[in-house]
Image: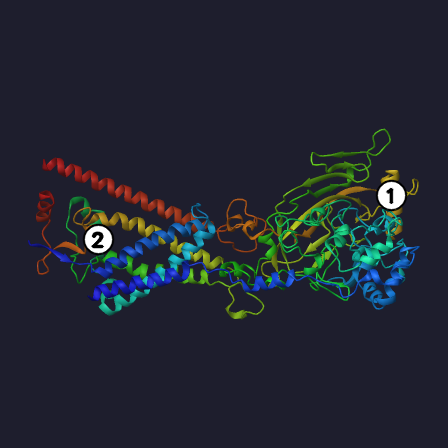
Amino acid sequence: MKKIILILSVLGLLIVIAFGTLSQREADPTHLMKLKEEYSRKYTPPVDHSRFAVLKQKFDSPQDVTKACVTCHNTTPHQVMNGNHWNWEREEFVSGRGIIYLGKKNAINNFCIGTTGNEKSCAKCHIGYGMDATDRVYIDSTNIDCLICHDNTETYAKAPEKAGNPDMTLDLNHIAASVGRTKRSNCGVCHFYGGGGNNVKHGDLESAMFEPTTDLDIHMGTDGPNLQCSACHTTRLHNISGKLYSLSSMNISRAFCEDCHTSTPHEDDILNEHTIKVACQSCHIPEYAKENATKMYWDWSTAGRLKDGEPYHEEDSLGNHTYISIKGSFKWERNVKPDYVWFNGTASHYLQGDIIKDPSQITVLNQLHGSYADYDSKIVPVKIHVAKQPYDPVNKILIKPKLYSDRKGEGAFWMDFDWQAAAKIGMRDAGLPFSGKIEFIETAMYWPVNHQVAKKEKSVDCIECHTTENSRLAGLNDFYLPGRDRSEFVDTTGLILIILTLIGIALHASVRIAVHVKNRKRGN
Amino acid sequence: MEKKQVYIYRSFERFWHWMQSILIFFLAFTGFEIHGTYSFFGFREAVRYHNIAAYIFIGLIVFAIFWHLTTGEYKQYIPTFENIKAQLNYYIFGIFRNAPHPTKKTVLSKLNPLQKLTYFGLKILVIPLSVTSGLLYMFYRYPTKRGIEAININTLETIAVFHTIAALLLVVFIIAHLYLITTGHSVTSNLRAMLTGYEELEGDDEPAPAPAENKNEEKSK
């Protein structure tokens, strides 16, 4: 009787434990439901701009539109002119440098290198009008381009190479009457084409994101939540959260998945534990450039080749440029698995004029900081873009060439295809020395991948990191990762011990069998 | 010399033994998958099953400890160096000559000195090492700013390596154990005893039989 009670109680306990751990509880819907409800609420604008008389006047210049806007929004210019979309720079504290103003003026990137001297072309993506090499535009509030961010007709566009001015054939009255909250189309016209073409820079921001499916991006998918950029990049008084580490150094004003999803969004405690060290993006963005290819490598050293004295270009099977005379050769990739780095939200940058100590090593233009030991760091997915850029071997600095001009003979590389002239004039404009010698060295940029979040079923599987073969995290070796790492000594010793035991058993057993057979024979 | 069927392993003991063997095999199988030795269930499922089995194993251990303490059976495992040489001699030489087991197996003393030493080592060192490192592994929390610096464990490595050591020692034990169960009176007598509870033993009052008698007994089978 006692025995039966004992066995039953043991079994009972086992069943309780098994039920407790085996049963998959349904995901608690409340938090996600609340989010979905919140973001599906339709926004009704408080005013109808088409009824304002001031917007029905004839606009002779884009500045007239701004003046009309300001008649009501009279504190807005102050907000905009304090922002980095206007100033193209941020005040940043960088350890080792102190407080600096970091922006497109002094940073060098991996694509068209720098804006200095090329403003007329670059300004196509400045939220202002009439940009040139002087700082005049930045102090005149009528040069704010309200429409590029607030046009809701999706027809407004800046004209190329017009210093930020729009095409004046547009119906500005119609556009001004439509203004409202920013949409993907407003942000996308610049941010999807960074680097001089669709998806060149980011890899996770491209024209397919104007109207994405949930397969491409679970948040912005038009067949799903259909979120606009500003749903996550929350904005107060024209101060937009979330930033780009090509031009940011400090861990402030960031946009996080956790802002909506909390840091413990999973039912599974083991997955929730991951969020201490792994950014959501690392698992939930298994690949980027899912629709169109992104540029992975840019070799400036081959730029300038001409056919019959004329620039030309070559394309790959997907229609991506593999060579353009004005820019050099490129490598493109689609459905790219990200690289992974530790990142604590701070970065340091190569600024123009910084001495490169070892040009044989790849020069990282925006070094993301972080390590396993740093409590603020998480593993984040990045696109690593590598370029070969012009470099002055005597002064040991990167060269900022003059690229754009609307006429020949001004030294612009895109017109004259002369590196010497382009470097000389570019460096003069930037106020930097130039020795007359040009070499090409490799530079790299890290682009954190934050968009094109996949459906949860498509998330990175455990085994893709927790494995000895081709682990996604093979490059991060400052910590112990179960399934990937082991003590070779312990494993080898253990294996030897097992083999010795088996040999011992084999010997012992064979002697026993031999003796047994012999005895039996003798017995017979 | 009188032989009789003795009820030597009680039902809980047998339940405990077989449950334990199933769990250890399962834990080893899932554990080495997590270790990256092979792939069968898939990493995530392997982790899940391993954790569930670990909880059941810990539950079983709690019951076993309770049983051992209340029945006094724990005394069986107190190691002794008495007769240890004779036992070693038996495994290295005697067994080939059909020499008798030097340790008499009785209900009150089921284990020979080598068994006592091995099982004691398992219970005191290997299983606690495995369970402790396993629990630390399971409940490992990465250090954060909000944590208490003094009790932070900065890396899983030490925990994982000790857990692997315990696992490898258990594998070695199981291999040796599986072989040594064939060294009873007959190849299967130990196994049968652990299944049925009954084993044919010499009478309690009798002295150890002489080698010749034993030989005869073997031949008569």
Q: Chain of mark 2?
A: B
Crowdedness of circle 2 by 10 Å Cα count: few (<14), some, many (20+)?
some
Q: How is the image coloured?
A: rainbow
Residue B216 in view of the camera: yes
What amino acid is at disc 2?
A: Leu
Residue B125 in view of the camera: no
Q: Residue A308, located in which quarter of the rendered image?
A: top right
Which one is in front, A53 or A427? A53
Q: Chain of mark 1?
A: A
Q: Position of residue B210 (x, y in %)?
A: 9, 51
Residue at point 34%, 54% (across, down): B24
Disc 2, SS = helix
Q: Position of residue A150 (x, y in %)?
A: 79, 58
What amino acid is at disc 1?
A: Ala
State the residue position of label 2.
B195
Side of A298 where A5 appears, left or right: left
Q: Residue A60, located in which quarter of the rendered image?
A: bottom right
Instruction: Tell if the residue under mark 1 belongs to the same chain as the one under mark 2.
Output: no
Image quadrant in which the C terminus of chain A is located: top left
- In 3D space, how far apart are the residues under numbered discs 1 and 2 (Cα atoms)? 89 Å
Q: Position of residue A292 (x, y in %)?
A: 68, 43
Disc 1, SS = helix
State the residue position of label 1.
A422
